[in-house]
Amino acid sequence: MRLEGEITYKLESRMYKNLHPILNPESIAVVGATNRPGSVGRAVFSNLIQGGFQGVLFPVNPKARSVHGVKSYPSLLEVPDEVDLAVMVVPPEAVLETMEQAAVKGVKGAVVITAGFKEVGGPGLERENRLRQAAHEAGMPLVGPNCLGVINTNPAVRMNASFAVRSPKPGRIAFLSQSGALCTSVLDVAAGRNIGFSKFISFGNKADVTEIDLLGYLKDDPDTQVILMYLEDISDGRRFIETAREIAWDAKKPMLAIKSGVSAEGAKAANSHTGSLAGSDAAYDAIFLQSGIQRVEGVTELFHYAQAFASQPMPRGNRVAIITNAGGPGIMATDAAIRHGLKLAEFSGRTKEKLREHLPPTANIHNPVDVIGDATHQRYEAAMRDVLADEGVDGAVVILTPQAMTDVLETAQIVPRVARGLDKPVLCSFMGIVDVSAGVAHLQEQGIPNFLFPEAAVRSLAAMVRFGERLAPRPRWLRPVKADCSAAHDLIVEALEQAESYFMPENEASRLLGCYGFPLLKSRLVSDPDQIEVAADYVGYPLVMKIVSPQIVHKSEADGVRVGIKNLDEAHAAYAQVLLGAKRYDPSARIVGVNVMQMAARGVEVILGANRDPRFGPIVMFGLGGTLVEVLKDVTFRLAPMWESSAENMIRGIRSFEVLKGVRGNPPVDLAAIKDCVLRLSQMLEENPEIAELDINPLIAYPEGQGCAVADCRILVRRLP
């Protein structure tokens, strides 16, 4: 069967696997289908029949003549017709043989529901590797193993190839999950909330088909408007970002994700501040932010947002109107709006005049609009029409508390009627369960999302606003900065001649930064007291002295730093002191010398850092700098390379951004100069994969227009495997 608007894949690009035979098959063979009550094989075949699958079904079971009254076949090879999809529900030891039969048969796709693979380790991992290899050799896309199965609710397909207890109703939401157990709970919750799905896919161990392939399919799926994901890991961070960006900016489909299971891989390296702060979860946060995906905390929030995204138009801005028949909930909604970045809309004079005309004198005509507890549906309708017609309103939250004189169902009936054709989102909070049930049911039937409490409605509207803000013209890569890549490469090669993993002392690290145009302070390395005077004359007083040793990472801990040196006598004394401190700290350390450095003028200290995640590559960090950075942990992360807008957002994303804007009479810092350094660092990391860790701490930021300066830096380089 071929669907109207069916997706056509550019297979020549080989970016995504062809999932059409899996999600839109014309024929399905269930290998392991059985009549035995309580078995997975029976549940899968029963779901396909009861769901009304529109293609041809072939049960495969050597011990049964028929399954559910349908003629059974001893093996895949004996099925007389072509098979698009093979669903395998056989013991793990038999899966590989079944895959080999499927390859001979020319089956186009497979779903392996069977467990007992890499999730059990040992022989299971080896078994999964052989299964993956067999799928690749056959050119057969494979979902699973260890999964619940796949569902497509399109009326032309009606495929429930899973062992879920219930089939979802059709809808505009696609759900992808690594956890099959979570899927069953999600389906149950969705049924209770009258939520439907376009596709529902449990992909388990993803031996072959990954979340990236599935997103590539859903990007152009005409049935899917919103994509929900439960992820435990991501196969390829770069491809994931690029695919998700196409979905967000090109297809304009909202994506929401729950991410669980924080790997310890990113916490192993602790040679730098960045290494100790940039765990794998920071990488996932960066991936989601840069790809337009909103990360949510749990299933409840996931469904709240999904209901709003799937049924309401995107807001054009963040100005919200609140209409309520009770003061307390209106205040709760107002507080939530401010907390989540929304603004209370300022009504025009004309709107206020109409509200005065339509509401009683005791009503509040300002935002939030209080229509008073005895409000009937006529009063709600008048308030909604007046408020939503205001050009200064981008969306509304309608709150109703059930009171003796409240006609709940009639009020619910006017909401979709007023909202129709306005192209503004309207979310409701009919508060309660029993007394408002009839009204809530009507709202759900009409596609108006309702939330038990107003804070959830406001939070969901704020999520829509955030997505709407991302629908601006897609940002482009910044043109690369001018850099001496050849010199940088030579410096790294020279460093790695010392060791496989080498910590570049500050003087060497500064030279590497200089290749990429970072704003460096004057400095001169001295290894003999006789060199101090010439170095000091070059740098100028006051100056700073720092020990230089590959073995001493944190110089201040070794008493290896002196600042504010004003003359030659102080310089000689400081030289001797830092050498003595270093020898006491680590007698075996190789002392390269002492770095004589220009003393930076006072400014705001920030930190730039980088860590190379084993799976996702270079991650850039930004935050307030200084010695307390690991205590405050006020930092943000992005993957390199990044867009200019990503650099801007990571700077603005720290909790203490107000400090950079200027507080207590201090001027705002030069944000453009900081952004320039972030982008230079991003490019340097992308072009030099040997850089494993990096700290620029502090980067001194000066008032707007006066730039910034690198006051200290450390770089760890590693030989590539």
Image (tube, rainbow, N blue to C red):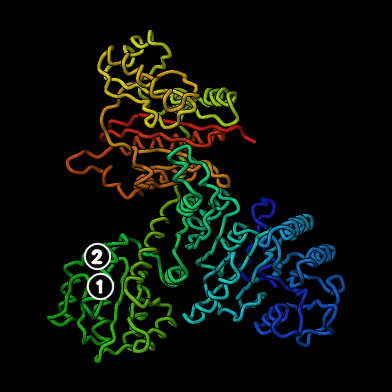
Return the disc, 2 or 1, that comes first in the chain's sequence.
Answer: 2
Q: Residue at x 34, y 48 (%)?
A: 654
- CB-based contact (under 8 Å), mark 2 and mark 1: yes
Mark 1 — residue?
Answer: 387
Q: Is residue 502 left or right of residue 27?
A: left
Mark 2 — residue?
Answer: 345
Residue positioned most to the bottom: 404
Of tags 2 and 1, which is closer to the observer? 2
Q: Between marks 2 and 1, how big is the CA–CA gap? A: 10 Å
Position of 567 relative to 160 (above/below):
above
Position of 603 relative to 401 (above/below):
above
Position of 507 relative to 222 (above/below):
above
Image coordinates for residue 617, horizontal then vertical, percent: 55, 43
| Figure quadrant of residue 22 | bottom right
Residue type of the residue flagged with mark 1: Val
Q: Is residue 289 visible?
A: yes
Image coordinates for residue 184, horizontal then vertical, percent: 57, 75
